[in-house]
Image (spheres, helix red, strand yellow):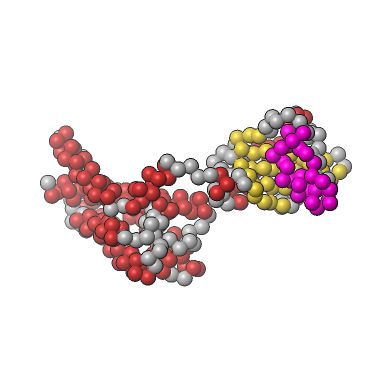
Amino acid sequence: MLIAVREVQIPLVAVMLLGGCSAKLLRITRTGSMDGALGPTALFPLRLRGPLAITVCAIELGLGLGLILTAGQLGAGTSAMCMRLGACLLFLVATSALFELRATRPDVGCGCFGDFSTAPVSIRTLARSALLAVAALSTIGLKPIHPPKSSAAALLLLAILAAELVVLGVLSPELGEGLVRLGYAEPCELRDVPTERTMAALRRSKYWRRLSGLIASETPADTWRELCWRYVVYPSTYMDRNAELVFAVFLRQRRPTIHAALVDAVTGEPLPMLPGQPARGWLNLAWLRPVNVLAARLAGLAAPDTASAGPDIPFSSDL
């Protein structure tokens, strides 16, 4: 029974390490940075937070994979001992750091699982970290793990694993946060979508491939956000007149809807059509009203009523 309990700890600790690393990588992907004050890195100067967070993430990834790779026939050597001892030390250091964080920065979350760990460090968080340190310590000196020889042995391992997962779930404030997020749809007006992600989505779109030949400069003339849309304006030319190619990208992390239009650079009036594009698509520019208002202010003219310019037929594309 004791051997079975010790064997379960290796996949459990490995999954926790890989899960924490994956959550941190997701935070990097979403925000493009890990400089925010989240976890024990908040105890360090701002310039060190990013490198420290990346280092911790790399250590978690290496130890998680190492625990899995050394669990079998390679588990009797020095490499397995180093991986298991390293995991134990990591959780011991994490527990000490969380004690310090709770004392000096009680408003900061532990950062164990990225954006899911925003709740202030509590006794439950400390107990979970200490429990994982004990779990990693119990694997030191364990012989290589073999598949269970009978269904009864397999059921015993599953029962032990399920019991430990329940205990970890009770000690994890992230579980409640995750359930809340599953049932919550963030309004598009409040979404934090970096400009870099918008530009990357735009350059992957079919409209960019079709219309980029009209662009006169690689640098946008203007970029701004209005509610759920980010507008990107490029200087261009059309039939020997100065024009602006306007893209509107819906603020969504994946496969955003994109609108495109060509407008006169002086008046902001939409031009009738582009080569190879249906005219009716360019006449539906109700979404372009912020561009027309901006152009009218710059030119000292009244903003045109784009709603009356044509039927309300969307000209957009999902990437």
Left or right position of 91 against 262: left
- Up-down relation of residue 201 to residue 297 (above or below): above
Residue 28 at x, y percent in the picture = 48, 54
- Up-down relation of residue 278 to residue 138 (above or below): above
Residue at x 67%, y 51% (from the top left corner):
224
Residue 70 in sight here: no
Residue at x 66%, y 34% (from the top left corner):
316
Left or right position of 77 against 52: left
Numbered disc total: 0
Residue 255 at x, y percent in the picture = 56, 38
Q: Residue furthest right?
A: 240
Left or right position of 36 against 18: right
Q: Would you say the magenta stretch is mainly helix, strand or loop?
A: helix
Tell which of 244 and 70 is nearer to you: 244
Q: Where's the C terminus, which quadrant?
A: top right
Chain part drawn in magenta: 282-308
Residue 115 at x, y percent in the picture = 43, 53
Q: Is residue 301 magenta?
A: yes
Residue 298 in sight here: yes
Residue 306 at x, y percent in the picture = 76, 38
- Up-down relation of residue 107 to residue 25 (above or below): below
Residue at x 53%, y 54% (from the top left corner):
32
Q: Is residue 107 magenta?
A: no
